[in-house]
Image: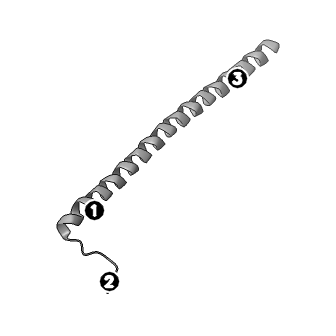
Amino acid sequence: MNEGLPNVSLETAIPYVAAAYIGIWVVLFGYLITLGGKLSTLRRQVDALSDAVKSKKRNAETAAKVEA
């Protein structure tokens, strides 16, 4: 049944399985940290755009009052 596969003992396999799980978790956390950084950058950009729109609206209202 397992003619082509080597016979590996449990003591030999455990470090490799543990390393694979640790590697997966490290990659996952790295990805989440990267997404968090991108999210905070986008949030700052949205806040800046919102402030710019509010400022432009205030300027337009002020100009309309001055003309009236």
C-alpha distance separating marks 1 and 3: 58 Å
Q: Which residue is mark 2?
A: 3
* CA neighbours of label 3 inside 10 A, class few (<14), some (14 to 19), many (20+): few
Which of the 4 quarters of the picture holds residue 10?
Answer: bottom left
Q: Label 1: which residue? A: 17
Of residues 3 and 39, the one nearer the viewer is 3
- Indicate the amino acid at tag 3: Lys
What distance separates the C-alpha of mark 2 from that of mark 1?
22 Å
- Secondary structure under badge 2? loop
Q: Position of residue 24 (x, y in %)?
A: 36, 55
Mark 1 packing: few (<14 Cα in 10 Å), some, or many (20+)? few
Question: Residue shown at 39%/51% (left/top)?
Answer: 28
Look at 44% across and 47% down and name the residue there: 31
List x then y, in percent, for residue 63.
Answer: 77, 16
Q: Which residue does the image show at 20% across and 71% down from the upper left? A: 9
- Secondary element at image label 1: helix
63 or 43, which is in the foreground? 43
Q: Residue furthest bottom?
A: 1
Residue 32 percent coordinates (x, y): 42, 46
Q: Amino acid at mark 2?
A: Glu
Of the pair 41 and 63, the residue shown nearer to us: 41
**Taking 12 as reference, is 67 left or right?**
right
In the rendered view, would you say 54 is above or below 9?
above
The answer to whether the residues at label 2 and label 1 have Cβ atoms under 8 Å apart is no
Residue at point 47% right, 37% down? 37
- Choose the circle earlier in sequence order: 3 or 2: 2
In this picture, is 19 found above or below 9? Answer: above
> Which quarter shows the C terminus?
top right
Mark 3, residue position? 56
Q: Amino acid at mark 1?
A: Val
